[in-house]
Image (spheres, rainbow, N blue to C red):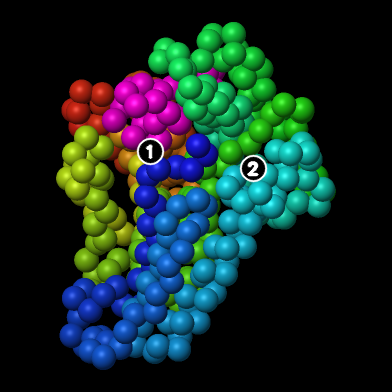
């Protein structure tokens, strides 16, 4: 039950973003095949593809990027039993944690503070409660009983995480999920790696998309926002240059057949949010876009608007429960 059903897709198009997008002066040889990698990452389907006129350089970049993503996955995955995150959840402590784990959990606490608790990585006990409830035969379709929700909420609170360079600790009964921020963080780290190796035009998509510069021909990248109600339909197309895009929606995972209960938990009430069909954020940072698309899913439009001057989000595309779209800008 812990696997997110929404298909995640990673695509990296470095140096040349496909032959049709290149100016003729930069065209890659017609017989040059792209370097590709396919597998799973953070519990979902993942692909990397690099078009480059130097095949050996493309393969080297694929190797570097996939190795870095795998290294980070071994820290942050809730699906790998030997990951650092799973160790923290089992024992309540990590001694001498990786610098990236310290950085990501510190960022998570920051976004929790900024959103007054709407973003909280310690909601895993709520996930476990709802998953356990709905996998039982004859489960009450009204959801877990209020007393059980209150018991799980007693184990939620990002502020109770103790985060230091020498150790990370949390009280017994607490558990962390990084599914609302890790994909963005890994995307940022891969973008940093590619930039460090001279990539100026690329699109990295790990569920949360981030563009490096423009397309090689100077045009902006176009990122589609899926219509959660109609398979294959695009609700909106966002043009981006050097920006990240992240979408959160209740359709990402539903516990019950009717879709009344989903993975977007309100850390204050323990209930599931159905305020919007989808929330899409645009930011220079995929980490910020990822975390805040999750947090904004719980907030009324007025509250989101009031936060925009104080967070690293430039645009928010909302589709409300009735299907009406709107866009907010910082």
Q: Which residue is mark 2?
A: 105
Residue with the most extreme front position = 137
Q: Residues within 10 Å of mark 1 (few under 14, many from 20)?
A: some
Q: Quadrant of residue 9?
A: bottom left
- In the image, is 214 to the left or to the right of 167? left
Q: Residues within 10 Å of mark 2 (few under 14, many from 20)?
A: many
Q: Secondary structure at mark 2?
A: helix
Look at 40% across and 88% down and name the residue there.
Answer: 55
Percent across and percent down for residue 214 are 30, 66
Q: Which residue is mark 1?
A: 252
Q: Is residue 110 visible?
A: no
Using the image as rendered, state which of residue 310 and residue 60 is in the foreground. Answer: 60
Q: Which residues are magenta?
A: 249-277
The residues tagged by marks 2 and 1 sit, at their Cα atoms, a distance apart of 23 Å
Look at 43% across and 60% down and name the residue there.
Answer: 46
In the rendered image, the quadrant that contains the C terminus is top left
Look at 54% across and 9% down and name the residue there.
Answer: 146
Give the number of the mark in front: 2 or 1.
1
Q: Secondary structure at mark 1?
A: helix
Q: Is residue 217 visible?
A: yes
- In the image, is 267 to the left or to the right of 249? right
Using the image as rendered, state which of residue 167 and residue 63 is in the foreground. Answer: 63
In the image, residue 268 lies in the stretch drawn in magenta:
yes
Look at 67% across and 46% down and name the residue there.
Answer: 85
| Mark nearer the N terminus (2 vs 1) | 2
Percent across and percent down for residue 312 are 45, 43
Percent across and percent down for residue 224 are 24, 50
In the image, residue 148 lies in the stretch drawn in magenta:
no
């Amino acid at each position: 039950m812990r696997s997110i059903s929404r298909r995640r897709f990673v695509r990296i198009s470095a140096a040349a973003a496909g032959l049709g997008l290149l100016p003729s002066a930069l065209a890659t040889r017609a017989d040059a095949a792209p370097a590709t990698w396919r597998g799973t990452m953070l519990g979902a389907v993942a692909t990397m593809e690099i078009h480059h006129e130097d095949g050996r350089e493309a393969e080297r970049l694929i190797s570097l990027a996939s190795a870095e993503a795998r290294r980070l996955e071994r820290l942050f995955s809730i699906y790998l039993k030997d990951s650092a995150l799973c160790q923290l959840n089992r024992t309540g402590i990590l001694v001498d944690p990786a610098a990236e784990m310290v950085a990501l959990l510190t960022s998570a606490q920051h976004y929790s503070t900024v959103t007054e608790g709407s973003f909280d990585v310690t909601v895993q006990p709520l996930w476990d409660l709802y998953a356990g409830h709905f996998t039982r035969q004859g489960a009450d379709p009204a959801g877990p009983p209020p007393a059980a929700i209150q018991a799980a909420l007693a184990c939620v609170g990002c502020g109770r995480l103790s985060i230091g360079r020498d150790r990370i600790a949390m009280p017994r009964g607490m558990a962390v999920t990084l599914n609302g921020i890790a994909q963005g963080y890994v995307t940022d780290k891969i973008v940093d790696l590619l930039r460090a190796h001279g990539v100026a035009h690329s699109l990295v998509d790990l569920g949360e998309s981030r563009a490096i510069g423009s397309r090689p021909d100077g045009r902006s990248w176009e990122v589609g926002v899926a219509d959660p109600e109609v398979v294959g339909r695009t609700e909106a197309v966002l043009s981006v240059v050097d920006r990240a895009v992240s979408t959160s929606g209740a359709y990402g995972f539903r516990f019950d057949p009717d879709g009344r209960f989903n993975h977007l938990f309100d850390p204050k009430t323990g209930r599931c949010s159905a305020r919007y069909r989808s929330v899409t954020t645009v930011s220079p940072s995929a980490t910020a876009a990822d975390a805040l698309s999750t947090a904004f899913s719980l907030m009324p439009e007025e509250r989101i608007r009031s936060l925009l001057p104080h967070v690293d989000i430039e645009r928010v595309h909302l589709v409300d429960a009735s299907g009406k779209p709107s866009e907010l800008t910082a």
